[in-house]
Image (cartoon, rainbow, N blue to C red):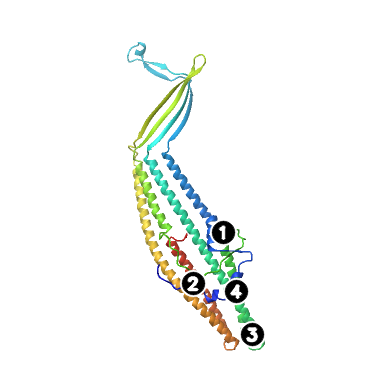
Amino acid sequence: MNQKHPTITPALGLLRWPLVAVLLLSLAPVHAQVRSLQQCIDSALVHEHRIKIADADERIADEKLREARGGMIPKLRAGADYKYYIDLPYQLMPATVFGGPSDVYRAIQFGTPQNVTTNLALQVPLYDPPAIGAIRVNNEAAAMAGIQGERTREDVVLEVSAVYYNAQIIQSRLAFVDSNIVNAEELVRSLSLLHEQALARGTDVDRMNLQRDQLKTQREQVQSQREQVLDVLRIFMGMKTDAPLAVEPVEPVVAEPLAGSGTTTAMRLADQALHLRSAKLSLMKQARYPSLSGQGFYGTTGFGPIGVDDQFDFYPMSFLGLQLQVPLFQGTIVQHRIKAERFELEKAEEQRAALKDREGMERRAAERQFTVAQGTVVNAEAQLELAGRIRSNTVALHQQGLAAVSDLVMVHQAHREAQQNYLDALVDLRKAQLELERLNGGLLK
């Protein structure tokens, strides 16, 4: 969006009124610390439970990746074995060994009653396709966990920003209501004096009293809304529910949305899902490949008891070798798994294409909404300024006896509507700005 938009200047009815400015600063409790939006976001990124859960998911994915990498590290095992033979094992020997006839065998018992064996076995994976494929799968899964964590942080930033802006708008609305109450009190006093002088009717005084009471009721409602919004903000920031908190006064000037990578985390997740599916498909195909590993073995076997001293005789045994495993037939399990994973990959590709189309449409709509919202704020600001002038002029005319009380009621109502329209326009502008930053990948900036 390179199009230049008109600068949004502070509204006369909001920031140019000394009374309203004082009210904005007086809304916060004396000991309440005014927090900026960035301070609230930084605190939420530390204390929000979803952030902690996402961090735990990333650590889990990293550990699983390290576990998969351990599959290609040599393994060394130690073993020990003890056997006591109640009946020694038999072995058939040809009778010819003892001078007997051929085709005749004799049962001979060999060995000693007790055998003790200790050994060390070493296995070195040289080529293991399933282990290599598992490393790739877990590497892609760890990358996806990182993107999901980033998306969670984006969601928190988006929600905290929306709540903060809402608190600012409610705070401004409360300031407007307070200023309207002050004006209504002045009109009530003025009409009461005129009524005492028989220059105004009692019904006129009653009508202004009614408007003042309605404004007071409205102030209680707005104050309750403000506390509710601040409670939500406290929860995001990990603060106690009774902790004093205030937000900065609303700033009508809104800069252009921050530019980012141009790619949303949702699209990056869709891309990463394709990489993960492709890695899983490769892993299933590699289950058909042979694997090769080196082997080493060293051990000793003790036979006993032997001799008058009942000692054991120990004899070493060791070897080095290679082990080749070739899967020849595993049924149709792997075949069907590969087909199912191919369908999953096709499904992920279609989901990514649908997401791309939807995000393109949302981006164009958000750009239009932001442009319209900027113009709406400018118009609402001008209307608020005009309504303020009309109200001031009407009050002056009424003091000169040239305007009726009904005119006062109408201009005050019109001024309040202009205030509400201005605040609504600011809300729409903030929402459009956040949406554009999300779609442009610049929300975390």
Pick whichever of labels 4 and 3 is earlier in the sequence: 4
**Disc 3 on helix, strand or loop?**
helix
Tell whether label 3 touches label 4 (CB within 8 Å): no
Pick whichever of labels 4 and 2 is earlier in the sequence: 4
**Disc 1 on helix, strand or loop?**
helix
Q: Is residue 212 above or below residue 106?
A: below
**Which picture quadrant has residue 178?**
bottom right
Residue 157: image x %, image y %?
50, 60
**Amino acid under label 1?**
Ile
Tell whether label 2 touches label 4 (CB within 8 Å): no
Could you tell me how far apart the alpha carbons at marks 4 and 3 are, in whole angstroms?
A: 25 Å
Write down the residue under mark 2: 425
**Which picture quadrant has residue 121?**
top left
Q: Is residue 221 above or below residue 391?
A: above
Write down the residue under mark 3: 202
**Amino acid under label 4?**
Asp
Residue 217: image x %, image y %?
60, 73
Q: Residue shown at 44%/26% (left/top)?
A: 299
**Residue density around tag 2, few if under 14, some if 14–19, many if 20 or more, within 10 Å:** many
Write down the residue under mark 4: 178
Pick whichever of labels 4 and 1 is earlier in the sequence: 4
Write down the residue under mark 1: 235
Pick whichever of labels 3 and 1 is earlier in the sequence: 3
Compared across the picture, whether 86 is left or right of 397 comes to left
